[in-house]
Image: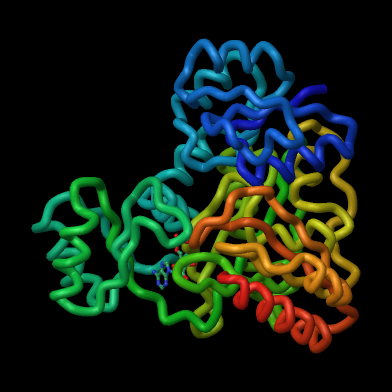
Amino acid sequence: MRIGILGGGQLGLMLAEAAARMGIATRVLDPANDAPAARAAEHTCAPFEDIEALGEFARSVDLVTYEFENVPVASVEWLAERVAVAPSPAALRTAQDRLLEKEFFVRQGVRTPPFAPVGTHEEYRAALLRIGVPAVVKTRRFGYDGKGQRVVRSLKEAEAAWAELHGVPLLVEGFVAFERELSIIAVGQRDGGVRFFPLVENHHRRGILRLSIAPAPDAEELAAEAEACARAAIREFRYVGVLAVEFFQRDGHLYANEMAPRVHNSGHWTLGGAPTSQFAAHVAAIAGLPIGELEPAMPSAMVNLIGAMPDGRALREIAGTHVVDYGKSPRAGRKLGHVTIVAEDMDLLMERVDRVRRLAEAAGG
Ligand code: AMP
């Protein structure tokens, strides 16, 4: 079997490596000639809109998946007419647009921050009046890692945000003074079954994920709520593969922020922290193979390595660590690798996490 992956970043790399361990070959399509996944997969270097390349790609694989959320839906739909595609293009279409995504959550009865779509300055002012400040102004499409969004705390900041972001469809959202951020990684199977990794607690700085802790402490009831939300998405989209949903926790309730129809950074801890990684689970699910055990034996955490790689030896000297280097050239704010940390108990885990974070921050992340 050969699986085609649209997008050849670190997610594609880790998918390709997981597939290889299962005896499955992969081919990635990515316009960058230095795509990290090319280390582990055949690489077709072409734009996502290149019909000739897409046709050749479709003919050369048994199944297509994607790791890049902004791959054009039209290309994915075109492929779906020629070869099996998972997850479904419908899930991708919804996840690409923050408005469709939030409307989907509302239809499922899932709480979200208040939101309003905005095109004109008049609509913008009206939305801010209704929602109030602080608010978060986001581009409806193409945002990631805090890009394409501004927190607005006053009328003056609102005008500055408008000047920066206007010209594309926007969403104004109420700012949630959350207690913490959480995410669930679900796996939809071909037979409609759904499996879950434990709920994860996430810490962001400047819009970028820095740390995940699994399982999220004191979150049993919230886990059931998060699972119900992911289950609804999997049912609605006949979703096969890994799906991530991110939430804010406030006053004991979950507010859905967004979903990602792909393997997700907050699931990287599973690589070394769970008996089956999210990458292996995704490959198994889309290929129709048994998924294996997901429940981790010990608490686990993941620290992202951002901007510059710390000394690998110093990281590995900390007990319970598993370091993954994506092989990307360093750049401020760029995710270059991550460290999975496991420990027998939460106290020891957090002690090790602190040591890893100090090394990561000293290096520039
Ligand atoms: P997003 O791109 O929507 O995942 O946002 C990136 C990060 O910005 C989130 O993980 C939060 O830390 C923060 N953020 C986004 N939306 C809101 C909101 N409505 N209220 C408070 N913080 C937010």
Work out which quarter of the rendered image holds the N terminus and state it.
Answer: top right
Snapshot quadrant of residue 272: bottom right
Q: Residue at x 61, y 54 (%)?
A: 244
Q: Residue at x 88, y 40 (%)?
A: 290
| Ligand 1 located in image quadrant | bottom left
Q: Residue at x 59, y 50 (%)?
A: 329
Q: Nearer the viewer, residue 280 or 339?
A: 339
Please say if 140 is above or below 48: below
Please say if 193 is above or below 41: below
Tell me residue 189's x, y (percent): 75, 40
Tell me residue 350's x, y (percent): 75, 84
Snapshot quadrant of residue 54: top right
Q: Is residue 109 visible?
A: no
Q: Is residue 287 left or right of residue 23?
A: left
Q: Nearer the viewer, residue 100 or 32?
A: 32
Q: Is residue 356 left or right of residue 109?
A: right
Tell me residue 180's x, y (percent): 55, 79
